[in-house]
Amino acid sequence: MNNIGIFYGSTTGTTEDIARRIAGIWGLSETQIHDASTLTPALAESYNILILGTSTWGSGELQDDWYEGVKILKKTDLSHTSIALFGCGDSDSYADTFCDGIGILYEELKETGCQFIGMTPTDAYTFDTSIAVVDNSFVGLPLDEVNEYGKTDERLAHWVEQLKAEIS
């Protein structure tokens, strides 16, 4: 049985809101949603699927709560863990660092033995560059609540269905 935990880093509340919306679509309990600042090795290891969300700050930086969270995850046995990433960014004002936060999480965690799921094709997005793009796909689900908020519900629903298919 799959045990899913959602961890988010959110400064303004947008990424937290997205985390809660993902949980709602999936039918997950409130107890499965966690702020990244509360992450511990034991908590991470209690799940075999981690959904990690972050916003991108400044010139392509990770949200603050994730700096310690990444250190914790790198010390955790993730060899039997699937990880899905989602991120919030601004594809207009920050088109050259769009959702770089999920790219940073990917780069930091790719040597942990985890399996990444939930890649998203880039063709439905307008941006210049992103370190979150690997082999012509985003390493997770990028969302733009500033310029493309009208697309979020559909993107979330499709992504959750994609994740369900990938873990079945």
Image: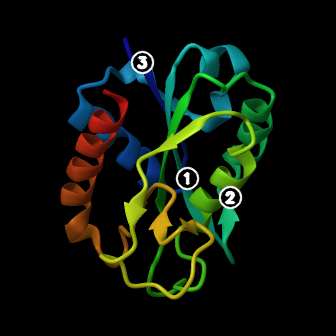
- Is residue 13 visible to us here? no
Among the 4 quarters of the image, the one containing residue 41: top right
Who's the residue at 18% across and 58% down the image? 154
How many labels, in total?
3
Would residue 163 be found to the left or right of residue 48 on screen?
Answer: left
Q: Quadrant of the C terminus?
A: top left
* Residue 73 visible, this angle: yes
Mark 1 nearby-residue class (10 Å; few <14, some 14–19, many ≥20)? many
User: Seen in the image, is 142 located left or right of residue 107?
Assistant: left
Q: Please tell me which residue is depicted at 46% across the width and 55% down the height of the picture.
A: 140
- Where does the image place residue 57, in percent across and percent down from the top left? 63, 68
Q: Are marks 2 and 1 in contact (CB under 8 Å)?
A: yes
Q: Position of residue 52 (x, y in %)?
A: 53, 42
Amino acid type, mark 3:
Thr
Q: Residue at x 64, y 52 (%)?
A: 106
Q: Earlier in the sequence, mark 1 or mark 3?
A: 3
Mark 2 or mark 1: whose residue is earlier in sequence: 1
Q: CA distance from mark 1 to mark 3?
A: 19 Å
Mark toward the viewer: 3 or 2: 2
Give the vertical position of 96 relative to 67 (above or below): below
Q: Secondary structure at mark 3?
A: helix
Question: Of callouts 3 and 2, which one flags the residue occurring earlier in the amino acid sequence?
Answer: 3
Q: Secondary structure at mark 1?
A: strand
Residue behind mark 1: 54
The location of residue 65, given as percent across then percent down, is 68, 45
Q: Is residue 95 left or right of residue 151?
A: right
The kind of residue tagged 1 is: Thr
Disc marking residue 104: 2
The percent position of residue 48, horizontal first and vertical second, equals: 51, 20
Q: Amino acid at mark 2?
A: Ile
- The residue identified by callout 3 is 31
